[in-house]
Image (tube, rainbow, N blue to C red):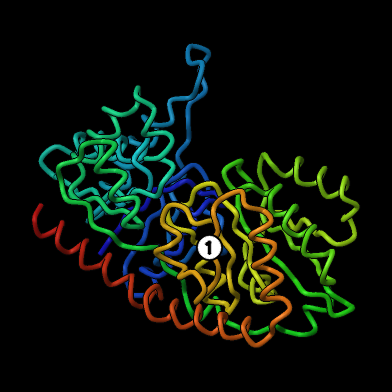
Amino acid sequence: MKIGITCYPTYGGSGVVATELGLELAARGHDVHFISYAVPVRISALSERIHFHEVEVMNYPLFDHPPYTLALASQMYNVAVNESLDLLHVHYAIPHSVSAFLARAMLGARRIPVVTTLHGTDITLVGSDRSYLPMTRFAIEQSDAATAISEYLRQVTVREFGISRPIDVIPNFVNCDVFRPGKEPSKRLEFAPHGEKILVHLSNFRPVKRVTDVVEIFSRVRREVPAKLLMIGDGPERTAAEWLVRDKNLAGAVVFLGKQNQVQELLRLADIFLLPSDLESFGLAALEAMASGVPPICSRVGGLPEVVTDGVEGFLTPPREVEAMAACALNLLTDAERRQQMGQAGRHRALRDFCSSKIIPLYEELYRRVIENT
């Protein structure tokens, strides 16, 4: 199949999943065409089966804001015609599915099917703004197929938008050959030269991720156990987290690594993973930690209970309960046997339920169904 994929090419979960989906599809023999304003972050190189088509937005004094939605629709149309695409798969309802609807309308008799995958923020934040609700609902219902990354998100979408059409749940996934256990002692020494425990957080540092809570948790852990904290990612809350690190005299123990493409090499160094978010529609970073054999400690919110079983693969606590999360972390850091058991359970869960080899065929089956019905 020839598949066009549109996503935000950034470090958020939706962009990562869309990119990894394209890479996996290409590895299985499909031609994948990414259509966006920049090359997605996890694409290290283009190839004969992985292509990129840049959306160039016209700057004109008449426009206060560049008309990205229209420019994207035009590029979708061009790529669909020039590359004879079989299907457009857009990630995020707003504005991507709206652009896909316009592109499909421009194609006229050559009707191209559109699949929309909902990732969370497009529903829980953007879509729930009442001014966007009619447009979001229209875009979802006009898609030939719609998917959600968790049962939680499917239910929220149906409830908040009154969606009558079916929404398939296809969960996020992880390449279990890339994200795998392996502590790599020499690499650990770079960050923990005296045998300190290593805690890791990975996110886009938006307010919902509660990165200052990560620092608060670590501060409490370090009173009891020698430890280091690796902060992977970047975003608007980084400055607040850096200030808190200095305020608590933790500068020598916390390393801000910024945006990283090869996060698997860092995750497998961790002893535990922290994700104290206010909301996660799925929790891809927690899954990546589990596949790496690292127990996650997360908030019990959104779709995370569908990924992490409390007390089995990791711990779930109420959001913003810093003391409870610190207690869970100390429980694992002072009990090597239990930490290993949880790490193994998380790896097993990832292999059983979320490995790309199990999830990608679900997308292929969906694609074939909508193409046949178009």
Residue 24 position by quadrant: bottom left
The answer, for residue 191, to whether it is visible in the render is: no
Q: Is residue 131 above or below residue 32?
A: above
In this view of the protein, which residue sits in the foreground, 81 or 372?
372
- Is residue 244 left or right of 348 when viewed as pictured? right
Residue 270 position by quadrant: bottom right
- Is residue 352 left or right of 333 when viewed as pictured? left
In this view of the protein, which residue sits in the foreground, 315 or 27?
315
- Is residue 371 left or right of 70 when viewed as pictured? left
Q: Is residue 225 above or below residue 299?
A: below
Q: Residue at label 1?
A: 316
Q: Is residue 41 above or below residue 207?
A: below
Give, as a three-letter code, the residue at label 1.
Leu
Q: Residues within 10 Å of mark 1 (few under 14, many from 20)?
A: many
Query: Which residue is at a point 45% across and 64% down the rendered structure image?
Result: 20
Query: Which residue is at a point 33% across and 35% down the rendered structure image?
Result: 74
Percent from the top left, x then y, of residue 312? 49, 77
Residue 132 position by quadrant: top left
* Quadrant into which the N terminus falls: bottom left
Percent from the top left, x then y, of residue 263? 63, 66
Percent from the top left, x then y, of residue 372? 10, 60
Query: Which residue is at a point 69% across and 41% down the rendered structure image?
Result: 237
Percent from the top left, x then y, of residue 272? 66, 71
In this view of the protein, which residue sits in the foreground, 371 or 275?
275
